[in-house]
Image (cartoon, rainbow, N blue to C red):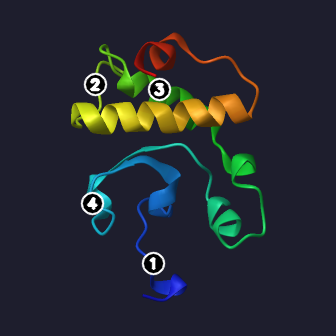
């Protein structure tokens, strides 16, 4: 598949999501936490850490918590939740930011 034909969800590639249960099915992608500029990072033109959407990070972290974001927890397997938590925690570490309690409890 050519880059111009790559699948997206909300204009974002699968790499912008903490969960992509089926990489070929955008309907399974959850917890977006990057800006659209991630496409430039994937082509090597920008550091991927510069494409983080910190508001999206906050929402993604909240969605992993038992109370969820807006009362809705992400629908995912326990393994997917732990993998997403580890992925998001790595972004916090690289940014030199403290882990939110939700992530600290999961990683």
Residue 8 seen in the current view: yes
Location of mark 2 (residue): 72
Depth check, mark 4 against mark 2: the one in front is 4
> Would you call the spot at circle 3 few (<14 residues within 10 Å), some (14-19), or many (20 or more)?
many
Real-space Cα separation, disc 1 to disc 4, in angstroms: 14 Å
Real-space Cα separation, disc 4 to disc 2, in angstroms: 21 Å
Q: Are dots 4 and 3 in contact, CB under 8 Å? A: no
- In the figure, is residue 6 to the left or right of 21? right
> Would you call the spot at circle 2 few (<14 residues within 10 Å), some (14-19), or many (20 or more)?
few
What secondary structure is marked by label 1? loop
Depth check, mark 2 against mark 3: the one in front is 3
Location of mark 3 (residue): 61
Image coords of residue 55 (percent x, y): 60, 32
Q: Earlier in the sequence, mark 1 or mark 4?
A: 1
Residue in view at x 51 percent, y 15 percent: 104
Q: Earlier in the sequence, mark 4 or mark 2?
A: 4
């Amino acid at each position: 598949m050519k880059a111009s034909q790559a699948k997206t969800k909300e204009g974002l590639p699968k790499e912008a999501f903490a969960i992509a249960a089926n990489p070929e099915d955008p309907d399974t992608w959850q917890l977006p936490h990057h800006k659209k500029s991630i496409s430039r990072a994937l082509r090597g033109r920008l550091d991927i850490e510069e494409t983080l959407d910190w508001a999206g990070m906050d929402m993604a972290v909240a969605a992993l918590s038992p109370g969820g974001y807006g009362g809705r927890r992400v629908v995912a397997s326990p393994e997917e939740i732990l993998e997403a938590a580890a992925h998001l925690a790595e972004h916090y570490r690289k940014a030199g930011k403290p882990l939110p309690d939700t992530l600290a409890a999961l990683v």
